[in-house]
Image (tube, rainbow, N blue to C red):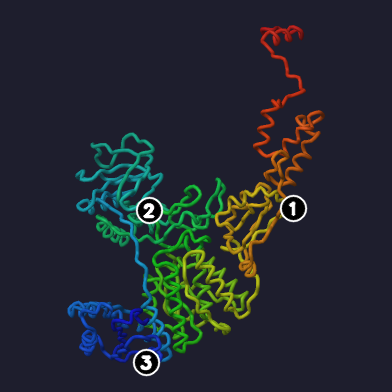
Amino acid sequence: MAANRDGEGSRIVAVCSCEDTMPLDLAAIAKGCQGAELKTARHLCRSQVDAFKAMLAGIPAQTSAGQILVACTQEAPLFTEIVEETGFAGEISFTNIRELAGWSDQARAAGPKMAALLTASTEPMAPTRFTTLTSAGVALIYGRDETAIEIARRLSDTLDVTVVLSRPGDVTPPRSAVFPVFRGTVAAATGWLGAFELTINDFAAPSASSRARLVFGDSRNGATSQCDIVIDVSGGNPLFNGGDLRAGYLRADPGDRAGVEALVAAATGLVGEFDKPQYVALNEGLCAHSRSRKVGCTRCIDLCPVGAITPNGDHVAISAEICAGCGACASVCPTGAVTYALPPADVVLRKLRTLLVTYAEAGGKQPVVLVHDGDHGEPLLDALARHGRGLPANVLPLRVNEVTQVGLELSAAALAFGAAAVRFLGRAKPKHDLSGLMRNVDYANTLAAALGYGEARCGLIETDDPDQLRAALDAIVPAQTLREPARFRPMGEGRSLLKGAIVELHRAAPAPVARVAMPDRAPFGGLVIEASGCTLCLSCVSACPVQALQDDKDKPTLKFQEDLCVQCGLCAATCPEKVISLAPQLDFEAWVAPPRVIKQEEPAHCLNCGKAFGVQSTIDRIVAKLENKHWMFAGDLAKRTSLIRMCEDCRVEVVVNESFDPHENRPRPAPRTTEDYLRERRERGEDPLG
């Protein structure tokens, strides 16, 4: 537990053996509690609860700097209640060392892990920003039979419901018109909780005289419906990409009674205002999506499972209302324009550093970082501790919001800090698309293998079975010992954070090399430019969003700085000569070298004023192609090529002053009238009016 910067206040770490169900290596644990007073107990929440009250009494009530960390999350409500009763003005926090370390068949070796967990839990977290979604309870129930009508009947007391039946068969009319029923098929759907809009074709109202079955009148296409909630029991394809992740869109198979019951229960709670986290942040100025209507990077758009990311001019737009929080966009964004905010990557990396550094200082060896989420990972680890063998003593769990949010920087930093391996814990049936995560795992493994860390240092474990999880962790082969683990402090965000982690990974590598070829779409690399075909038009410089391609103010020059390149492809798409191609790689020597000159030529100087206005070789080629080969620059007019060797200002002045006529010395055709055409027809023996 870190010492208070001001040196004020008391800090206490309370560790309990939970009725001696887990051994405590106090010597190792103490190394994670430097600057704090370590208190131990056997039954702190029950028989020794007075000891906890004594800890509170030991810190003056008015001392707001007082901090207590209790190594128990199960009894957090009880301890919080005691704190409130005593009027303790300091901070109290909780962390779990029981299920994550103490309840394990390797518990006696878990002291370093406990020290790491305790210390990492004190790392400050960033505040969360929210978007407010407002629902007035206007619901559209989309179905095909009486199931939709029955759901509407049950929800009509709490929601303002409308039923739309797609291609219904014989449907018995409701006895009372409490809610409207229509026929129609949803052709398009957009929006989110509180702001849905649906386009409905074959839309028709039923006849009021419908007797044994609903009889619908004339239909029309293109009807629109605006609602707050969409309840889909049509049994067809989802109305939205990643439909289960769309706030306010509830879907169940009409034949699944349990699913329908859960849907009804969920719908009743969707009235009011709801704070939805803003999972990602966008810096439009860094986005490399497009320039001058040329499309470059589309990594985030390609991976978004719910369609929350759309093109918006030169950059993209991200709907916080639609975003499902998977973070795939942030994990693959090469420029750092999109960053994850729950929490930010630098906060996660600082916690990772604390875990690994404290673990090593407490005597731990061969640490394996297990990245998991809260919804799936925590219950699985809990089940493994309670009903299985528990986590191995060298496995350090690191919770994030979604494993798909993690970029290459985490794997690189973990290996640099001394991790033997990194594993991501996913579901047997993934909640989010894992292709972005696997792309980063592939990048990390490519780097690790090339730099001597070993093969398959990073990987994904997809399981819902705690015993399978333990087996996968036990199968990890120990890594080669590092020369000296890195101890850098992760700073910045986005691209700078990634570059810092990569540099430190190379610096700590057991077998560093100067260059590593990377898979396609890696976020860094070089360019292959055919200099002989380059005309130094510098359109690529204008298109480059990160200034990796540069020019020179003194003479026509194209330079390239490799550590800035994000492999967006805008330069290749913009180049009129098509002489640029991407080369995904990591050239560590180029990263620290000054910009490399790709091509440089002498400028062309104006014949009149001497101003540099172009590339000399290009002007010479233009003159060679036109002189005595184009009628405007042939014969007596060949002298006009001097205009090509002038700057734009002098060229205009000469043309105006000399009354330049592009048709000079060429007879202009005589004007032709209708009489001329009629005369020619008569001369050919044709009827002039035919």
Quote the CA–CA distance across marks 3 and 1: 69 Å
For the residue marked with disc 1, what is the amino acid? Ser
Q: Nearer the viewer, residue 99 or 566?
A: 566
Can you tell which of label 1 and label 2 is closer to the viewer? 1
Front residue (pair 528, 321): 528
* Element class at badge 3: helix
Q: Nearer the observer, disc 2 or disc 3? A: 3
State the count of labels. Answer: 3
Q: Which residue is mark 3?
A: 26
Residue type of the residue flagged with mark 2: Gly
Q: Which type of secondary structure does the marked residue at label 2 adopt?
A: loop
Give the image location of residue 459, x and y in percent. Answer: 52, 73
Residue drawn 30% across the image and 86% down it: 14
- Mark 2–mark 3 Cα distance, whole angstroms, equals 59 Å
Name the residue nearer the viewer: 491 or 404: 491
Split into 4 quadrants, where in the image is the N terminus? bottom left
- Image location (x, y in percent) of residue 530: 71, 55
**Residue 235 badge:** 2
Q: Visible in this render: residue 517?
A: no
Residue depicted at x 27% and y 78%: 76
Q: Is residue 391 visible?
A: yes
Alpha carbon of mark 1 to alpha carbon of mark 2: how far?
61 Å
On screen, residue 613 versus residue 441, left or right, reads right
